[in-house]
Image (cartoon, rainbow, N blue to C red):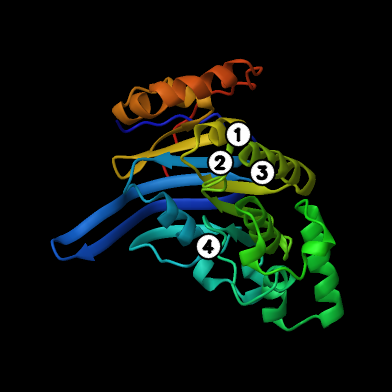
Amino acid sequence: MNTAVTNNSSNAPTVVDIRKLWTVFKNADGEQVVHRDLNMHIDRGEVLSLVGGSGTGKTVLLRQILGLEKPTQGVVEVLGQQPGELSASGAANVGMLFQHGALFSAFSVLENIAFPLRELKLLPDELIRHAALVKLQMVGLEPQHANKSPSDLSGGMIKRVALARALIMDPPLLLLDEPTAGLDPEASDSFCNLLRGLHRELGLTVVMVTHDLDTLFDLSTRIAVLADQKVIVSGTAREVIAYPHPFIHEYFLGGRGQRALEALHDKPATEQHAPRPEAAPR
């Protein structure tokens, strides 16, 4: 299957542009090709979710967008620059929420949130503290939590602190790796509501990896499916589910998928756009 569809026909500026990307890992058995001539773009204001089976390189793509890993071949551009070429101030264009929060255990909540600003060494301590307190409250936590250690926090609170840290530099692009993993249904719903509100209020562009179908359907404006070493299809949930591929049928139309789809069908359909090829580089 060489074609893919997308409902993304807006004139919004492209925030992430990936062209002819190859990711190859060497191991004892030789070489493992994870991505082969993969093309993908993400426009401003989208919440794009990456889904795919184990080993399809979803988190690897996030790390390449962030600049933590380099592709073997091809181009990754974030706001017109390759992540590896970003200066410290340019790197502030991307915030990352890691799956387990990745908080520093020896730091307090406020110190964790403030860490990226302190590393720049451009602002006075009092201004950094004020900015961290603002972000703490922005994610729904009270100032009395500022001096707590990560070990004193619940799983949901750890996610919120990590999100506040990801937003401390006011990045236009936010990357989320399994944002609701490990949360109970109530905490997961609450965190999704928080993310939805921040996306709307801050005008964020979001790229998300998630295995949770409720989160996927709740937040995504577009879904991109990784299989066969590339993006095989991207579009609205309804467009993606209609695409004929064994992984899509198994993932979306199994028991869990059917239950999540029931909730999706209760929502009004989003406006449909004319599909266009995603496979050709932009």
Q: Is residue 169 above or below residue 127?
A: above
Which residue is labeled 2 in the image?
A: 48
Measure the alpha-carbon separation of dots 1 and 3. 17 Å
Kind of residue at disc 1: Thr
Residue 66 tag number: 4
Which residue is labeled 1 in the image?
A: 221
Q: Reading the chain from its start, which is encountered first: label 4 or label 1?
A: 4
Q: Indicate the position of residue 47 as horizontal and vertical percent values.
A: 61, 41
Q: Secondary structure at mark 4?
A: helix
Q: Reading the chain from its start, which is encountered first: label 2 or label 4?
A: 2
Q: Nearer the viewer, residue 231 or 220?
A: 220
Q: Reading the chain from its start, which is encountered first: label 1 or label 2?
A: 2
Q: Indicate the position of residue 82 as horizontal and vertical percent values.
A: 52, 65
Q: Quadrant of residue 183?
A: top right
Measure the alpha-carbon separation of dots 2 and 3. 17 Å
How packed is label 3: few (under 14 Cα within 10 Å), some, or many (20 or more)? many
Q: Is residue 58 above or below residue 213?
A: below
Residue 73, visible in the rendered structure:
yes
Which residue is labeled 3 in the image?
A: 191
Q: Reading the chain from its start, which is encountered first: label 2 or label 3?
A: 2
Kind of residue at disc 3: Phe
Do the residues under discs 1 and 2 have CB atoms within 8 angstroms?
Answer: yes
Quadrant position of the N terminus in the picture: top left
Q: Nearer the viewer, residue 156 or 257?
A: 156
Q: Residue at x 34, y 47 (%)?
A: 56
Q: Quadrant of residue 60?
A: bottom left
Q: Secondary structure at mark 2?
A: strand
Measure the alpha-carbon separation of dots 4 and 3. 23 Å
Q: Secondary structure at mark 3?
A: helix
Q: Reading the chain from its start, which is encountered first: label 1 or label 3?
A: 3
How packed is label 2: few (under 14 Cα within 10 Å), some, or many (20 or more)? many
